[in-house]
Image (cartoon, rainbow, N blue to C red):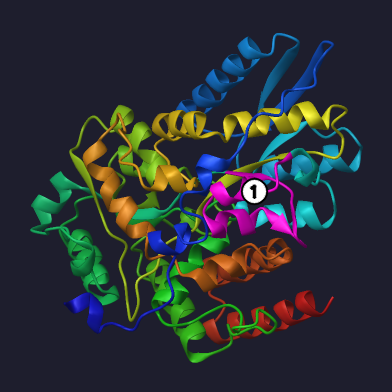
């Protein structure tokens, strides 16, 4: 098959995710009761679209019903840099929330500086065996666990069916037939030629989420760091060519100028209102588009690929902050929401993918456009393992800041790919050596 003829990259296959502990889930214990013998108040900071907010609120209500001495206040904060700036400010002042949601790419920083509590003392010895090994590793630092994995997600290519018909395009129907980089750009140019929308597409790496650029680097056969995660690899032929390819999207006017790395444009809105014909974004956008995109028909196909396939490692974990006065009760709430039953309920509500091995084996009954979710489930098998391990390094948050800066300069100011790669190499070396 065509897929087998391509260069292969170690991926987070379903087998990889579950090999460390199939069957261990049954032995897990959630039996440690909350120790809230007196009235206890917790606050829980998170961001999320409406389905996620409703999902967390339902879990809070369920937990409070089982633990009437505990009151949990939901603190909903706008996503992106604003969320983390506010969180860091509160933590610096000793006023952090008891509980906070955090991306896998950022938990390493909070573990390293101990802003998140070591949860090991509140968990049974084999508790982690119930989770996919990569996600458990992402939440761990120096052999201790500082958050509980809650869900994951990945990217696909949303497309406007009406626009595709106007342009005479047909989306790939299977993963092994996913578009090459050349085919993807030809489709974008065709959409531009036919003027189906002001712009052919957009990529959802706005709000300083530059790590979402990495799948393109791995698709092209590159990597940010070497095999030992000790040296930068970005200043290479593959790195420079990948920067140049993604920079060309802006130079050709294939994407809106305000959808660069540091942009704040809600790309899902651009797709829903017909400003763009294609959208590279995650599975969690399905409920939003199902409700808001009423003027057009739409579908989902696979990410483009080059010499290899790759997609985004998305999703979040949940942590207890150092400022919590009731860390044991807070940890009990985390175990509650990360249980099999409650994880299933949340991912169905938010249209996410599970991180518990038992649920990875299950056919989840998604309620909104369930026919689209297999695309994301298959695409998730293409997440490169080396990329995932790079993104969960404790120093990744610092590297991501530099990646935000340099890619945004390339996309918005015309900084050359060569200078961008060189600047990144220098910055990453300094970060790793510090």
Name the one closer to the observer, 71 or 357.
Answer: 357
- Residue 272 x/y as whole percent: 31, 38
Against 322, residue 35 (above or below) is above
Element under label 1? loop
- What residue sits right under mark 1 in the picture? 126
Against 52, residue 311 (above or below) is below
Tally of numbered discs: 1
- Residue 3 x/y as whole percent: 23, 75
| Residue 326 visible in the shown view | yes
| Residue 431 location, quadrant | bottom right
| Residue 353 visible in the shown view | no
Against 3, residue 160 (above or below) is above
In the rendered structure, the answer to whether residue 361 lies left or right of residue 297 reads right
Region in magenta: 123-149
- Residue 303 x/y as whole percent: 32, 62
Q: Is residue 137 magenta?
A: yes
In the rendered structure, the answer to whether residue 16 lies left or right of residue 82 reads left
| Residue 425 location, quadrant | bottom right
List the single residue furthest toward the right.
Answer: 93
Name the one closer to the observer, 429 or 380.
Answer: 380
């Amino acid at each position: 098959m065509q897929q087998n003829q391509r260069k292969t990259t170690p991926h987070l296959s379903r087998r990889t995710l579950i090999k460390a502990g199939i069957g261990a889930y049954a032995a897990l214990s959630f039996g440690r009761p909350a120790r809230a013998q007196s009235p206890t108040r917790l606050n829980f900071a998170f961001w999320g679209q409406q389905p996620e907010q409703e999902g967390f609120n339902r879990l809070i209500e369920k937990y409070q019903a089982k633990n009437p001495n505990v009151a949990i206040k939901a603190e909903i904060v706008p996503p992106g840099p604003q969320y983390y700036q506010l969180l860091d400010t509160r933590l610096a002042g000793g006023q952090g929330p008891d509980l906070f949601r955090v991306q896998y790419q950022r938990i390493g920083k909070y573990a390293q500086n101990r802003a998140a509590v070591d949860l090991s003392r509140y968990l049974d010895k084999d508790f982690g065996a119930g989770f996919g090994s990569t996600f458990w590793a992402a939440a761990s630092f120096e052999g201790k666990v500082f958050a509980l994995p809650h869900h994951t997600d990945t990217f696909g290519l949303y497309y406007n069916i009406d626009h595709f018909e106007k342009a005479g395009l047909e989306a790939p129907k299977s993963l092994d037939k996913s578009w090459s980089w050349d085919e993807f750009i030809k489709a974008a140019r065709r959409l531009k030629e036919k003027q189906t929308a002001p712009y052919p597409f957009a990529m959802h790496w706005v709000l300083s989420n530059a790590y979402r650029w990495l799948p393109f680097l791995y698709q092209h056969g590159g990597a940010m760091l070497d095999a030992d995660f000790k040296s930068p690899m970005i200043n290479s032929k593959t790195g420079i060519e990948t920067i140049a390819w993604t920079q060309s999207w802006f130079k050709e006017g294939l994407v809106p100028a305000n959808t660069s790395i540091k942009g704040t444009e809600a790309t899902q809105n651009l797709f829903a209102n017909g400003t763009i014909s294609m959208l590279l974004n995650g599975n969690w956008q399905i409920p939003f588009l199902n409700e808001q995109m009423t003027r057009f028909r739409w579908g989902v196909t696979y990410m483009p690929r080059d010499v290899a396939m790759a997609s985004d490692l998305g999703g979040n974990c949940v942590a207890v902050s150092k400022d919590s006065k009731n860390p044991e009760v807070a940890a009990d709430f985390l175990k509650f929401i990360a249980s099999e039953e409650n994880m299933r309920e949340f991912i169905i509500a938010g249209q996410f993918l599970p991180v518990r091995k038992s649920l990875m084996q299950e056919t989840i009954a998604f309620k909104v456009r369930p026919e689209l979710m297999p695309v994301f489930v298959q695409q998730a098998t293409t997440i490169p393992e080396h990329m995932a391990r790079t993104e969960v390094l404790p120093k990744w948050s610092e590297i991501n800041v530099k990646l935000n800066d340099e890619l945004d300069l390339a996309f918005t100011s015309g900084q050359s790919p060569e200078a961008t790669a060189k600047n990144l190499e220098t910055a990453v070396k300094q970060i790793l050596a510090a």
